[in-house]
Amino acid sequence: MNREYQTLAYEVRDGLAIVTLDREDRHNAVDRTMSHELPLVWKRVEEDPGVRVAIVTGRGEKTFCSGADLADPPVSDDPELARRLESIRWTARQNRVTKPVIAAVNGRTIGGGLHFVADADIVLAAEHASFFDTHVAVGFVAALEPIELARRMPLGAVMKLALTGGDERLSAAETHRLGLVDEVLPADRLLPRALELAGKIARHSPAAVARTKAAIWAAKEMQLREALEYGWRLIQAQSSHPDFREGVAAFLEKRAPSWAPYRAGEDDAS
């Protein structure tokens, strides 16, 4: 396990990166240091050709992430950047990571911690996990996380979280019913299941997986026709990639494919 980060643990197992928010004594809250280290670790995930899929989780069994650490707020040292949306770069999606990311929610997810859930491609949660938002309780605006959550779950459920300041909490079972969480598991099965899913994804063409992810997320942000056109351009781009021919050849020859590396944006149409 690599321990070069102060607030994160990072390891790679057979092409699967595990990013652990590692401030258990502070409920895995994001402080100034973690806010600086998260973009660095996501850049590492994206640029390492040996990493196919990433998993993000929290240290311990109580809390996945409690949001911003109010004792050491994660504010950028650059005053100009601090005023812009780009100053929040905690998640893989905020850092434009093209590789799939699975959130393994190991406990309470509070306030800004909801970023990691809303931005994950697949969300798994331990049975004891809970979700709530305390922004308004401390005089903050709950905006970014609810906006993201409203793309994944009903508006009323998002409003209940955002407006009650943590007095109303959603259980893992409730978030599964609402569509935010994809699977609910016993705590001891959480990481093994995340690794299992990640391994299934990692067996396939990195280029095809990245472009598939891009097409699906685009559908959440674009009008239907625009998203379909973008998806078609990605299909065309993939047809020029070596994996397009290799996949067919491997299937016909009944052998395991040998996939080529993929560099994001190398031949995609924007």
Image: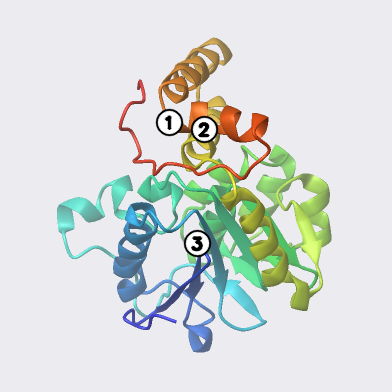
**Residue type at numbered disc 3:** Gly
**Residue type at numbered disc 1:** Pro
Q: Residue furthest front?
A: 253
Residue 87: x, y in percent?
29, 54
Q: Are marks 2 and 1 in contact (CB under 8 Å)?
A: yes
**Is 64 left or right of 30, judged from the image as shown?**
right
Give SS at disc 3.
loop
**Residue type at numbered disc 2:** Glu
Vertical position of residue 249 compared to residue 50: above or below: above
Give SS at disc 2.
helix
Mark 3 and mark 1 lie on one chain; the one further toward the N terminus is 3
Q: How many residues crowd mark 3 within 10 Å: few (<14), some (14–19), many (20+)?
A: some
Tag nearer the camera, 3 or 1: 1
Residue at 76%, 76% (x, y): give it: 187
Vertical position of residue 164 compared to residue 249: above or below: below
**Is 48 left or right of 82, judged from the image as shown?**
right
Instruction: Compare residues 269 and 227 and report the one nearer the observer.
Output: 269
Vertical position of residue 54 compared to residue 263: above or below: below
Residue 212: x, y in percent?
55, 33
Q: How many residues crowd mark 2 within 10 Å: few (<14), some (14–19), many (20+)?
A: some
Residue 55: x, y in percent?
55, 62
Give SS at disc 1.
helix
Q: How many residues crowd mark 1 within 10 Å: few (<14), some (14–19), many (20+)?
A: some
Residue 127: x, y in percent?
80, 69
Residue at 57%, 52% (x, y): give it: 202
Q: Name the residue under label 3.
A: 15
Q: Gap in Å between the C-alphas at discs 2 and 3? A: 20 Å
Q: Gap in Å between the C-alphas at discs 3 and 1? A: 20 Å
Q: Name the residue under label 2.
A: 246
